[in-house]
Image (spheres, helix red, strand yellow):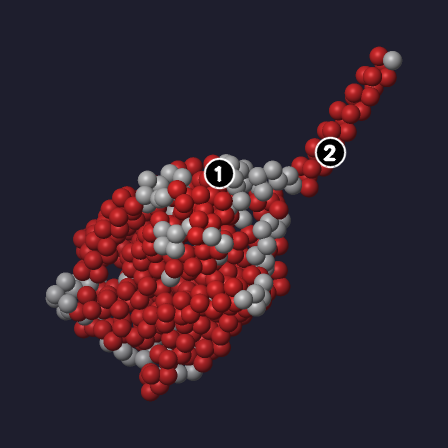
Amino acid sequence: MSAEQKGPVIGIRHLQAMLLFLAIVVNYVARLSVSVAVVAMTDADTSNPKFPEYNWTGVETSYVLSSFYWGYIITQFPAGFLVRRFGAKMVLLVPTLATAVLSGITPPCVAWGGWQAFSVIRIVEGLFQGLIFPCIHEHLAKWSPPKDRNRLGVFAYSGADCGSVLAMASSGLIANSSMGWPGIFYVSAGMCGVWCVLWLLLSSNNAPSSRLIGAQERDYIERSMKRPDGFHAQKIPVPWRAIWTCAPFYALLIVRSAQGWANSTMQLQTPSYMHGVLEMDIKSNALYSALPFLAMWCMSYVYLAFADLALSRSWMSLTTLRKSINTISYWGPAAALIGIGFLDKSQTNLAIALMTINAGLNAGSGIGSILTIIDMSPNHSGMLMAIVNGIGNIFPLLTPLLVGVIVTEPGSRSQWQIVFGMTAVVFFFGNLVYLIWGTTDLQAWDAENYLSPHDQESTSKNQMDLKSKAEKKESKTT
């Protein structure tokens, strides 16, 4: 393939992936740093003691941690329509800008209204951030030629791991600094604000509308989508009946729901587990809590390298590759989680090692199942992501509340065993369903001229009726 057919090695499509990476980073920092901030806010001895301490119960803390997802799931589905109507550039800007504002006003609002005000802010923040991932997926579908999809997709989504690392590692340091726990929120607000400026200056909804892209790269992207008349000009109706009767779609929905459950357990509960069972102070707690996500970030590129090698040498089909990587990413962590539950404060190093291995193995879920959405339907990827992410995030909404009910004593190892054991079971069965029914095959209902069996039957019947009427009319004339 010539250089012209391939497009430039580094181009504007890579810049868009970088902007998406940074978008996820800054929003994840704002979303996840609360798990460390809550520990500092309720135990002044673990951070800078000059700032207010709140006597919140475990149940009240669980409300704060879960409240984000109450808003988050509501706007997932509308996000699919909004991004189709207005494009990712505008729709992705709004939630990040709102997150900057909400993070900045959190400390004074908590001082005024306690955990209830904190929960309300988190709900509103969740409402805005619910728009993000449908936008990310739609933007990737518009900018990612099939040959570049793994690289661009994995790089963009690795922002979640990078954001998790920064949230966990920096939050404890900030809470111990002169800024105290309020600084966690102010730093998040500043990061989101800087990203908004970069996004306004450098992003475009698609290749044809970009003022920065060259003709060679634009033609390469358009041609690779197999739409010679312009992929991005397509306005295809959403085939609702076909989507909701598609077995691979349900397999995708279940496997991503399992990931949502596991993510919320590890991201939001790890600091509480380390503080309660392993009895670690917030500074070392935050740093060690970041290790699993650092492993996840690094391993995502290892999985990417293997995927590129496997596909370039035709070792396996794309479906087999995604399922194989997803199995390692789900069943490996399931075994590690069970082991973690049997450890106590005398085995701190082993517990941290297992959590790091757990997260590192799970890094393959991006290649394993997230990008399958674009494989199945590039035309409807934003809407599918809205549905999958919306339903999948019901579980992150419920798991902090469930943990709050199960873990009544934060230092109880047996109670945490139940939490980790349940998560392992969810991991196992989620991937099993995906192995049986999942696929990366382009679905028939992605086509512009797709007609469902019901529509085909109706069309055929109408044609027969018209033919019959024409024959009768001709017979009368004769």
Nearest-to-viewer mark from 1 and 2: 1
Q: Secondary structure at mark 2?
A: helix
Q: Position of residue 33 (x, y in %)?
A: 28, 62
Q: Residues within 10 Å of mark 1 (few under 14, many from 20)?
A: some
Question: Label 2 is placed on what type of residue?
Answer: Ser
Place of residue 238 in the rendered image (x, y in percent of width and height, measured from the top left): 54, 40
Residue at x 58%, y 47% (from the top left corner) = 243
The tag earlier along the polypeptide, 1 or 2, is 1
Residue at 46% of width from left, 59% of height from top? 150
CA neighbours of label 2 inside 10 A, class few (<14), some (14 to 19), many (20+): few
Q: Quadrant of the C terminus?
A: top right
**Is residue 335 toward the left or the right of residue 460 in the image?**
left
Q: Residue furthest front?
A: 2
Disc number for residue 460: 2
Between residue 357 and residue 39, name the one nearer to us: 357
Q: Which quadrant of the figure has residue 301?
A: bottom left
Identify the image quadrant of residue 399: bottom left
Please state which of residues 175 and 90 is positioned toward the viewer in this rendering.
Answer: 90
Give the residue drawn at x 54%, y 49%.
377
Q: Nearer the viewer, residue 106 or 356?
A: 356
Provide the residue designation for mark 1. Answer: 230
Residue 261 vertical placement versus 247 (above, below): below
Task: Specify whether 419 is left or right of 93.
Answer: right
> Type of residue at label 1?
Gly
Proximity of marks 1 and 2: CB atoms separated by less than 8 Å: no
